[in-house]
């Protein structure tokens, strides 16, 4: 067996130190009930906001004009995923107060409703 030289020992120590320095420290802890509840409550708030939007009289009129009944719209909102509901709730928040829906907004709502109906 060969004896290791001081240069080899130094190189091995340098490589070992570099490898140890690259490892990341992992920290895990329990998630509190408050954090879980806040995520669930946000999803519930978004769904309630979209449901209230669909319940408005002018929205019902526009949906009926497009051939979608109010009950079908409610069912479709109930069947939407949390991500879809959140995206739609953000669009509702971004609309001007008292403003009417544009044709693009109605088309997007209708497309989402149709996609949800197809996926069911």
Image (tube, grey):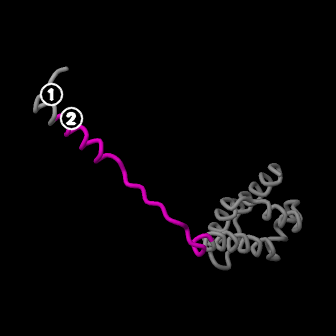
Compared to 22, does 59 lie above or below?
Answer: below
Task: Classify mark 2: helix, strand or loop.
Answer: helix
Query: Label 1: which residue?
Result: 4
- Badge 2 crowding class, 10 Å Cα cut-off, few under 14, some 14 to 19, many 20 or more, is few
- The magenta stretch is 11-36
What is the secondary structure assignment of the residue under circle 1?
Answer: loop
Callout 2–callout 1 Cβ contact below 8 Å: yes
Asked whether, in this view, residue 97 is left or right of residue 25, the answer is right
Q: Residue at x 78, y 64 (%)?
A: 77
Does residue 23 belong to the magenta stretch? yes
In percent of the image, x 68 and y 74: which residue is there? 45
Task: Name the residue tied to disc 2.
Answer: 12
> Left of 30 or right of it: where is 102?
right
- Residue 89's x, y, as percent? 66, 68
Q: Earlier in the sequence, mark 2 or mark 1?
A: 1
Left or right of 34: which side holds 61?
Answer: right
**Mark 2 or mark 1, whichever is nearer to me:** 1
Write the residue at 64% across / 78% down: 97
Where does the image place residue 62, in percent across and percent down from the top left?
Answer: 82, 67
Q: Quadrant of residue 103?
A: bottom right
């Amino acid at each position: 067996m060969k004896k290791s030289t001081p240069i080899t020992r130094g190189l091995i120590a340098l490589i070992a130190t570099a490898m140890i320095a690259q490892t990341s420290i992992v920290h895990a802890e329990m998630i509190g009930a408050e954090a879980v509840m806040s995520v669930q409550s946000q999803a519930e708030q978004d769904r309630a906001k979209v449901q209230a939007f669909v319940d408005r009289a002018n929205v019902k009129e526009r949906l009926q004009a497009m051939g979608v009944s109010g009950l079908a719209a409610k069912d479709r909102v109930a069947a939407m995923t949390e991500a879809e509901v959140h995206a739609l709730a953000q669009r509702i928040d971004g609309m001007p107060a008292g403003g009417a829906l544009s044709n693009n907004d109605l088309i997007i709502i209708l497309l989402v409703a149709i996609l949800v109906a197809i996926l069911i």
